[in-house]
Amino acid sequence: MSDRLAVRKTYKLYIGGAFPRSESGRSYPVTDPKGRFLANASHASRKDARDAVVAARKAFPGWSGRTAYNRAQILYRIAEMLEGRRDQFIDELR
């Protein structure tokens, strides 16, 4: 038996290249249609959503200014990185 106290994980958002805590500080479980647990998600507030929209609008000119080929390369590289860490993501979701 362990004497360690369980430390609750703080689930964060991803906005503008950073991982801020949600304003509410709350999270909720995400389940599939059969009710099986998939992940925990941060409960974003209206301010968090506004911040995300502002960050997306700021990033839009740079992203849309790239060629379709370059955007495809970036998305492909992201897919490669996610695939390379597939086992880690599966373990985290379990």
Image (cartoon, helix red, strand yellow):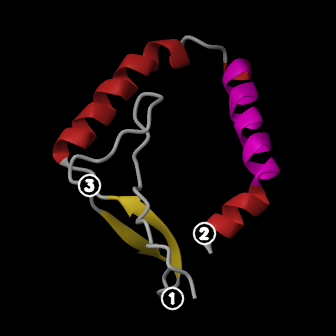
| Residue wearing tag 3 | 25
| Residue wearing tag 1 | 34
From the image, state whether disc 1 or disc 3 is nearer to you: 3
Amino acid on which the number 3 mark rests in the picture:
Gly
- The mark that comes first in sequence, 2 or 3, is 3
Q: Residues within 10 Å of mark 2 (few under 14, many from 20)?
A: few
Residue 20 drawn at (x, y percent): 36, 39
- The mark that comes first in sequence, 1 or 3, is 3
Amino acid on which the number 2 mark rests in the picture:
Leu
Q: Nearer the viewer, residue 2 or 42?
A: 2
In which quadrant of the rendered view does residue 48 lie?
top left
Question: Could you tell me which quadrant the C terminus lies in?
Answer: bottom right
> Is 78 a magenta residue?
yes
What SS does tag 3 mark?
loop
Amino acid on which the number 1 mark rests in the picture:
Lys
Numbered label attached to residue 93: 2
